[in-house]
Amino acid sequence: MNLTMTMDLFSQFASTTSLGIPLIFLAMLTPWLLFPTPSAKWMNNRLLTFQNWFLTLFTKQLLLPLNTSAHKWAFLLASLMAFLLSMNLLGLLPYTFTPTTQLSVNLGLAVPLWLATVLTGFRNQLNHSLAHFLPEGTPTPLIPVLILIETISLFIRPLALGVRLTANLTAGHLLIHLISSAVSAIFSLSVLTSLLTFTVLILLTILEIAVAMIQAYVFILLLSLYLQENT
């Protein structure tokens, strides 16, 4: 019985299939369909104006500490921010699937982008990138240990990117699922307790909306910090 309850609890994170084909790719493409396309008119509507304002403000704040050579990443980082933000928020709707709760999706985004920042550093400033593995003035007996530690910390970065996003979204969805199930189960026993639990559910949902936005921003912010180190 406990195994069945556990499987039902985590079944919300399983991608639905149609004719044996996983629909996770459709779920990942859906956010792009909701963004308004730019028009050739002189005056844009409110939605398009807000979208342009948000992307311009985000890009300006993100690239402010970076040097000029890193500004070519602006389009990629802004697009990834909009992609993650839309998927995280759409995943909070009832009967929807959130691709960013899958570790494979997050690692598929984190590993290539992290590797691109590392390769950029090795290509543009090889000596400076290698110097990160061994700080100046290190005692000779500690050199192998520090090189090993810095190498491990470097390769942990993409794993931390993907796991952080997955863990935060998964924990939030599990809490919402558990509390919503408690609301329906308690309603027949005590209406007042059920209403109080429902209030907690509303507050948790508001918190998860904030978490969905913050985690998308943190993902891009960490990538920009990795890029700053290598440019």
Image (cartoon, rainbow, N blue to C red):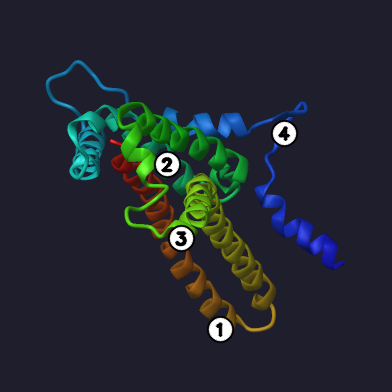
Residue placed most toward the observer, 178 or 77: 77
Question: Disc 3 versus disc 1: distance between alpha carbons?
Answer: 24 Å
Q: Is residue 52 above or below residue 85?
A: above
Q: Is residue 4 left or right of residue 15?
A: right
Of helix, strand and loop, which one carries label 3? helix
Q: Say few, some or many: other residues with alpha carbon within 10 Å of mark 1 (under 14 / 14 to 19 / 20 or more).
A: few
Question: Disc 4 versus disc 2: distance between alpha carbons?
Answer: 22 Å
Q: Is residue 60 above or below residue 163?
A: above
Residue placed under numbered mark 4 in the picture: 17
Q: Residue 124 at x, y = what percent? A: 31, 28
Residue placed under numbered mark 2 in the picture: 86
Question: Disc 3 versus disc 2: distance between alpha carbons?
Answer: 14 Å
Question: Disc 1 versus disc 2: distance between alpha carbons?
Answer: 35 Å
Residue placed under numbered mark 1 in the picture: 192
Residue placed under numbered mark 3 in the picture: 208
Question: Disc 3 versus disc 4: distance between alpha carbons?
Answer: 27 Å
